[in-house]
């Protein structure tokens, strides 16, 4: 019996939609990362992008447990000495709510070229509408 290895020509990606309102950020990010990688399929192959597209709506309504809402900070560094900036989670939720989910999912993907390609299949929107209705996404 031979081991099955998927080829990129044989992969037919699907589209899924996830409503993030009221869901815990970490648990949601794990599910999204596994679908992006293709870990939920029996044809999963680590060196081939077998994952699906994921559309996340209501990103501004994601929930964090404990004191993380007040304590979480995101650091940005532009390369110059002393130029690191910290943004709190409520500030990021107000200005750029998509970043919260994107940052969590990106941290759960591997750090290589294939994962950067997988990350482009994640589409996050703050509101309840998205422009991907033509792809007929299924609920995850």
Image (spheres, rainbow, N blue to C red):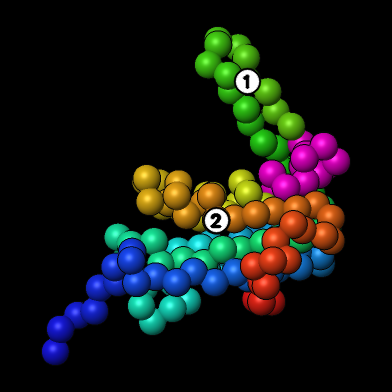
Apparent side of residue 135 relative to residue 96 in the rendered image (left or right): left
Residue at the far bottom in the pictured view: 1
* Badge 2 element: loop
Q: Position of residue 47 (x, y in %)?
A: 30, 60
For the question of whether residue 63 can be seen, the reply is: no
Query: Of the residues under marks 2 and 1, which one precedes in the sequence?
Result: 1
CA separation in Å, label 2 and label 1? 29 Å
Task: Answer few, some or many: residues within 10 Å of disc 1's Cα (few below 14, many 20 plus, some between 14 and 19).
Answer: few
Which of discs 2 and 1 lies nearer the camera? The answer is 2
Kindly identify the residue that appears in the image at 77 percent across and 40 percent down.
96
- For residue 121, which numbered disc appears in the image? 2
* Residue 89 x/y as whole percent: 77, 42
**Which secondary structure type mostly characterizes the magenta part of the structure?**
helix
Residue at x 85% of width, y 41% of height: 94
Any part of residue 88 in sight: yes
Query: What are the residue bounds of the magenta stretch?
Result: 88-100
Badge 1 is on which residue?
Answer: 84
In the picture, which quadrant includes the N terminus? bottom left
Residue density around tag 2, few if under 14, some if 14–19, many if 20 or more, within 10 Å: some
On screen, residue 126 versus residue 86, left or right, reads right
The number of numbered badges drawn on the structure is 2
Point out residue 51 in the picture as x, y percentages from the top left corner. Answer: 46, 66
Vertical order, 86 against 108 (above or below):
above
Q: Is residue 132 magenta?
A: no
In this view, the residue in front, 14 or 81, is 14
Considering only vertical position in the picture, is 75 above or below 60?
A: above
Q: Residue, x 74% and y 32% (percent of image)? A: 87
Camera-nearest residue between 69 and 46: 46
Specify the farthest residue to the top: 81
Q: Secondary structure at mark 1?
A: strand
In magenta segment, residue 96: yes
């Amino acid at each position: 019996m031979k081991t099955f290895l998927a080829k990129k020509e044989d992969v037919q990606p699907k589209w899924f939609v996830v409503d993030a309102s009221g869901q815990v950020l970490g648990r949601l990010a794990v599910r999204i990362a596994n679908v992006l990688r293709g870990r939920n399929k029996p044809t999963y192959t680590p060196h081939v992008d077998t994952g699906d597209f994921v559309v996340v709506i209501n990103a501004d309504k994601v929930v964090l447990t404990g004191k993380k809402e007040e304590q979480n900070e995101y650091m940005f560094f532009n390369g110059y000495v002393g130029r690191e900036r910290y943004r709190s989670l409520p500030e990021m939720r107000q200005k750029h709510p998509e970043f919260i989910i994107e940052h969590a999912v990106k941290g759960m993907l591997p750090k290589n070229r294939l994962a950067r390609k997988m990350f482009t299949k994640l589409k996050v929107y703050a509101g309840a509408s998205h422009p991907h209705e033509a792809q007929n996404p299924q609920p995850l």
